[in-house]
Amino acid sequence: MTYTRTECGVDFKNHDITLAVLNMEDIIHGHPKNFQINLGFQYEEDYLYCEDMRVCDLLNLKDVSSPVYVYSKKQIEANINKYKTAMKNSGRNIQLSYSVKANMNPSILELMRNHGLFLTLVSGHELRLALDLGQEPGKIVFNGNGKMNWEVDLACRSGVLLNVDSIFNMRQTIDVCKAGGYVANVLFRINPDINPNVHGYVSTGQEGSKFGISADELEEVLEMATTFEKIRVVGLHCHIGSTIREPEKFKQSTRVLVDLFNKLRSRFPDLYVLNLGGGLSIPYKSQISLPQKCKQVVQCEIDKNDDQEIARLYDNLLTSKLTLSTFLEAIKPLPRGKEIFLKLQEQVPSECLVPEPNDLLSSISDIIPPEAKVILEPGRSLVGNSAILLSRVLGTKLSKKKNFIVIDGAMTEVIRPCLYGAYHHVELAEPSRAAHLQNASDQSKLVWDVVGPVCESADFIGKDRLLFTPHEGCSIAVFDTGAYCSSMGSNYNMRVRPAELLVDGEKVKVIRRSETFEDMMKLYTNYYCFSQ
Ligand code: LLP
């Protein structure tokens, strides 16, 4: 189902009438009125837009209810293009492969495929989906530390690139090839023993990790591959973790892989692929304000050097026309900006300052042998910042110890805060109309925990957030929910999985309908007999 902006227009009007009958004084301003968050999302007069669509109006569409994931096509394409430009500038032969686990919505996969991306998969069903969509097997990488026989069989039968993760996985692959008469195109997933400096749950290439072939096991795996002629060793792979913020970590893992690549080339003449994995983070804290102590640093530098361009950018930051991350990115290449950037780097939270694909590739391109074909398999940095979870406020609770904004979105849609203590930015998606319920003194921001309705204290989306008091029904956005949110969603508390919308300029397409009670119950044996 696709809607146009005109179809939403009817609802725009209704909404505006509601606002018009309230005294304009009642609308609290002060929230960033007009500012560009990224290419997909911006605030105009306190209303959040996804491309050309005011997001609060999307909740009025037929077949759409809150909460709902809203994706920007423009932002996904901008993310792809950032990688493509960096790859081109690197002077190396690099192929981008989208990590499907980040978000498997077929419409998003279609977008990736149309841009020529390979797909990196971790399960037989992801493989079935990719093949169903028409992805050529030669453009698929199949990964996994525990593969079932049917999954290995499907991978070998289809002729995809298969990452072998352990001695037992090598044996399993040989057995499957023998039984089916297949030739397998194999990459060895190496555990390079590097600490990526991320949450332990997303660190995947250190000693003690369940992933990859360790130095001790390597010779045995190589020996097995050499003895069985149906194993065609085409590459090496590693993926040291996710949410990585230091290019140096990629450099370290690339070095390990390149050394091994050079050592093994005479032994395996078909070896040509270096798959360096994914893992680049995104600036989850791009929208936070500049810490007070940093303001002095910037002002001092501006006064000292009378740098007009930096002064202009700083003014845009202070008036909320630029996000902190965009400001930092913008000053970095300026002659005097680099110095300020380096001073601030120490003081702003690391989630503001995340390397870009360009930083990643500049740190590794020199060490990549020109004859190797490199695969990069990002997930988060292609889709993470392309979506919000749009929810409605159910109510607010004030108490001596804590204030709560209770929304209809929950840990079932955004599990990352609860699972990894991850930060997702939260903002009202429209001006609050709660002021008329309160005293004038309440018309400032309060500190809130933003929580969902799930019956768990772990069900929080954000803690200690400075926000205006929202009215009941106010739309509210949880940012950067394009990666590992919908794909890690659940039905806990019998909550239905939300719909997903893809915005393309003035068009909105429902790319997944919301689940229903009936959808959930149809899997239970005899349910309909009991309920008759
Ligand atoms: N390649 C392999 C082999 C992977 O295991 C992963 C992610 C990727 C590529 C893509 O990594 P990315 O570029 O998206 O960081 N649920 C966690 C993330 C788990 C990532 C698992 N592997 C989260 O929400 O942060």
Image (spheres, grey):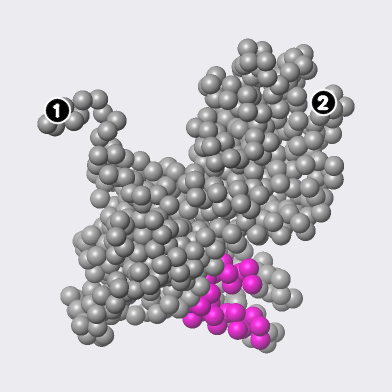
> Which quadrant: the C terminus?
top left
Tell me: residue 25, above or below residue 200: below
- Which residue carries the number 2 mark? 268
Instruction: Tell me, for residue 254, which label it has, or none.
Output: none
Front: mark 1 or 2? 1
On the image, which quarter does residue 312 sit in?
A: bottom right
317 within the magenta span? yes
Q: 376 and 104: which one is in front?
A: 104
Dot placed on the residue nearer the N-terminal end, 1 or 2: 2
Disc 1 Cβ-to-ligand 1 distance below 8 Å? no
Q: 411 and 56: which one is in front?
A: 56
At x 26%, y 57%, the residue is 406
Amino acid at dot 1: Phe
> Residue 225: x, y in percent?
74, 19
Using residue 241 as the reference point, say whether residue 467 is left or right of it: left
Using residue 514 as the reference point, say whether residue 472 is left or right of it: left
Q: For the magenta stretch, what is the residue range? A: 308-330
| Residue 416 visible | no
Question: Dot 1 lies on which element?
Answer: helix
| Residue 524 visible | yes
> Residue 254: x, y in percent?
74, 42
220 within the magenta span? no
Tell me: residue 39, above or below residue 45: above
At x 68%, y 36%, the residue is 138
- Which residue carries the number 1 mark? 530
Chief secondary structure of the magenta portion: helix
On the image, which quarter does residue 65 sit in?
A: bottom left
At x 26%, y 85%, the residue is 24
